[in-house]
Image (cartoon, rainbow, N blue to C red):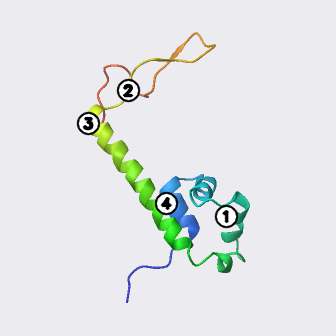
Amino acid sequence: MSNYETLSLRQIGEAAWGSHWMTDMASALSVGDRTMRHWTSDTGAQDIPADLEDELRDALLERVRVIQDMVLQLETVGIDRTPVQAEGFQTQVYTTMRRPGERRKR
């Protein structure tokens, strides 16, 4: 017997894509937003295709791979602090919220 409970698409989506998960998950699964909303409705869960678990697993593994790559790059080279000049604007925008010279808090 497993200690795991079945997961809802909402639980999976929020864990993988954050609070605005529905559109990103729909895109990752190559379905429309309306389909995703239907699947997460009270009456739509029974319409979720049997093979969706395999597709969702692949999409989640891709998310994990991208995040792991970002962590590795962050640890290896850090954040690019080069000023970015937005077209049509006179001010510079930095790619980090930290002030120049400020140390990263752990």
- The mark lying in front, picked from 2 and 4, is 4
**Tag 1, which secondary structure?**
helix
Spatial CA span between label 1 and label 2: 36 Å
State which quadrant residue 10 falls in: bottom right
Residue at which label 4 appears = 59
Determine contact: label 3, label 2, CB under 8 Å.
Answer: no
Residues 43 and 73: in front is 73
Q: How many marks?
A: 4
Distance of label 1 from label 4 (alpha carbons): 15 Å
Pick whichever, 71 or 66, lies toward us: 66
Q: Which residue is mark 1?
A: 36
Q: Classify mark 2: helix, strand or loop.
A: loop
Q: Position of residue 100 (x, y in %)?
A: 35, 19
Q: Mark 2 belongs to which amino acid?
A: Asp
Q: Is residue 4 above or below residue 22?
A: below
Q: Between residue 97 and residue 88, name the one nearer to us.
A: 88
Q: Which of the labelled discs sits on residue 80, or is there none?
A: 2
The percent position of residue 58, horizontal first and vertical second, equals 46, 63
C-alpha distance separating marks 2 and 4: 28 Å
Number of the label disc, if any, that sits on residue 76:
3
Q: Residues within 10 Å of mark 4 (few under 14, many from 20)?
A: some
Identify which amino acid the numbered label 3 is placed on.
Thr
Tell me how far mark 4 sits from mark 3, CA to CA. 26 Å
The numbered mark, 4 or 3, whose residue comes first in the sequence reads 4
Q: Mark 4 is on which residue type? A: Ala
Residue 40, x across and y down, in percent: 66, 69
Which residue shows up at 73% across the image and 61% down it?
A: 34
Question: Is residue 106 among the parts visible in the rendering?
Answer: no
Mark before the other along the chain sequence, 2 or 4: 4
